[in-house]
Image (tube, helix red, strand yellow):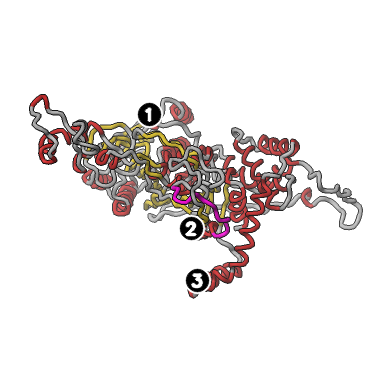
Amino acid sequence: MDDLRLALVLNAIDPAIGGVLVRGEKGTAKSTSVRALTAVLPPVEVVEGCRFSCAPGSPDPDCPDGPHEGAPVQIRGARLVELPVGATDDRLTGSLDVERALTEGVTSFRPGLLAAAHRGVLYVDEVNLLHDHLVDLLLDAAALGTNYVERDGVSVRHAARFLLVGTMNPEEGELRPQLLDRFGLTVEVAAPRDPALRAEVVRRRLDFDADPAAFVLRFAQEEAELAGAISDARARRGSVVIDGASLERIAAVCAAFDVDGLRADIVIARTAAAHAAWRGSTAIAQEDIRVASRLALPHRRRRNPFDAPGFSAEDERQLDDALGPDPDDEPEPPDDPQGPGGGPDESMIDTELSAPEQQQRPVDHAGDSVPAPSVVAPSAAFRTKRLEVPGKGDGAAGRRSRAYTDGGRTIGARVPSGVLHDVHVVATLTAAAPHQCARALVSGQLRGRVGADMRPLTAVGDHSRRPSGLLLERDDLRERRREGRESNLVLFAVDASGSMAARQRMAAVKGAVLSLLLDAYQRRDKVGLICFRGQAAELLLPPTSSVDAAASRLEVLPTGGRTPLSAALLEAHAVLGREKIRDPQRRALLVIVTDGRHTAGADPMAAAALLAREGVAAVVIDCESGPVRLGLAAALAQNLRGPCLRPEELSAGGLAQTVRSYREVA
């Protein structure tokens, strides 16, 4: 947890670093660490009554609650504002209070979470599950330090400088590389493996549960000292000099690691300056650059969406080479190869490797000897066509199938079920128009005008002087009904039997599935992976948002044995049934990659008919090749009531040439 504590402290010293992304397995106190940060942040002075936390000495000139001349000052602790995964964009950025505007005639801006987090901490738990457009808004505000709202006829800007912290479990899916780059620093955390340390964590937790007040008091002095150190480092940060030599070292490091863009250079410079201030210095040393690089580079080195961020021992050596010798270190005398302890370099001594053990040929349940399972590397990935679930859903927003969503094009109007946030003006006026005469009569505002001479009167203001406007009631309000795209559950059932391994087809098959996984990653889908060979089907990966986990299991998928196609379909039926209970709004797409042969188990057509009767959307990828084709995959697709595609039909190019080359080899 040392890197996590350091990254949080450095961002507390200089929030312009860009925040911290905390990655780690479940149960590693990620959220606990972030929530504890506010206890050591210095208190802030704010203008009393300002909803945007303006500083009394330098209030935001664009503050919607301003001006603040002569306003009283309030001192309060730093806030921790949490952004829930299901938040809407108007809840994040703020918006016009449409309901008050229409029913009361008042133009009122309703601040969002960015306003509440100004000069504090904005925490996003499970940031990898947050919708992409919300992450874009969030990171834009964090980078600019200002929130711009241009919507619903309102134009507002206000300061939004905060310490951004996001936590995530990589098992539940990764962030897009473009979004990863927007976080200043990243930290990998894991539970300690030292039994004594684990026991101490449990002991402290039990002590806190027994007497929270006494536990807090026990560490109050240490927290006060840490808060004072952070405050001193903040004051010292402005005096830290970033000299030309330090900038050249930073540029050399980023160039050596082949980092895209210049954001990494800027983040490392700011982080190194904050680390120097934390050390109590006003000059950047090489160690400051080393620490900053280890925190700022791991998540910016991904070249493939399935590559996990990290910093290996080889990366450490590459960092040392890029930094060069530390000018503050004295050179050490060279070792004497003939002196004490001298001798040949052990790394140059040849060692004799033991011979590998011979693999035994496995025997299937029928007693027949079958070839040993082999692992084939997938061919290169390519861009695939979009496979969709028929009809329209209303699941989580994504980029695959058509659905009713909060974004997208307007296709109609509906009565709002909660707070009105996306008003449909024409539908609202249409709903209110038939009631204007009756409402005017009831309110005594008609004044004898009838027919074409009658003009609707306003519900606000001085009605005795000017008859204008509409009489609106809450039941007249309508909001837009939009159509966009949703994410789906894409469940892959991959045939890994001996027939698929024949004619060297498995590399192309794995390449096709890997390409579909990449497409699922880009469309924000959940994925699952079923493998079937021998006598049974196995769920290698339960449905998850971690597409890279499916890709890693696919690469090491062995092939060989018989083809239990019926067992695979029944396993898919069971998996989809469980997921329907867990996530009823998310529609599923079953992708079966097979040549259609079945040499073990019952007839698969009965299982296919079962899936079809329950409305499961399915696509069959027909991998049969050779001069004579039986068309079994096409018959399977017909029973599933879904399309049957050849691998080359998934892409306009890419795999087509690969499949042709494999046919020529066969």
Of all residues, the one furthest to the right in this rendering is 339
Tag 3 residue: 212
Element assignment for label 1: helix
In the rendered view, does 105 fall on the left or right side of 302? left
Q: Judge the density around disc 1: few (<14), some (14-19), many (≥20) Cα neighbours within 10 Å.
A: some
At x 70%, y 42%, the residue is 318
At x 69%, y 35%, the residue is 251
Q: Residue 26 bears which disc, if any?
A: 2
- Which label's residue is closer to the chain start, 1 or 2? 2
> Does residue 358 belong to the magenta stretch?
no
Q: Amino acid at mark 2?
A: Lys
Of all residues, the one furthest to the bottom in this rendering is 210
* Residue toward you, 81 or 549: 81
Give x and y (percent) for residue 47. 49, 49
> Does residue 40 belong to the magenta stretch?
yes
Callout 1 touching callout 3 (CB < 8 Å): no
* Residue toward you, 499 or 617: 617
Nearer the observer: mark 1 or 2; the answer is: 2
Query: Which portion, as a residue range, is magenta?
Result: 39-50
Q: Quadrant of residue 587?
A: top left
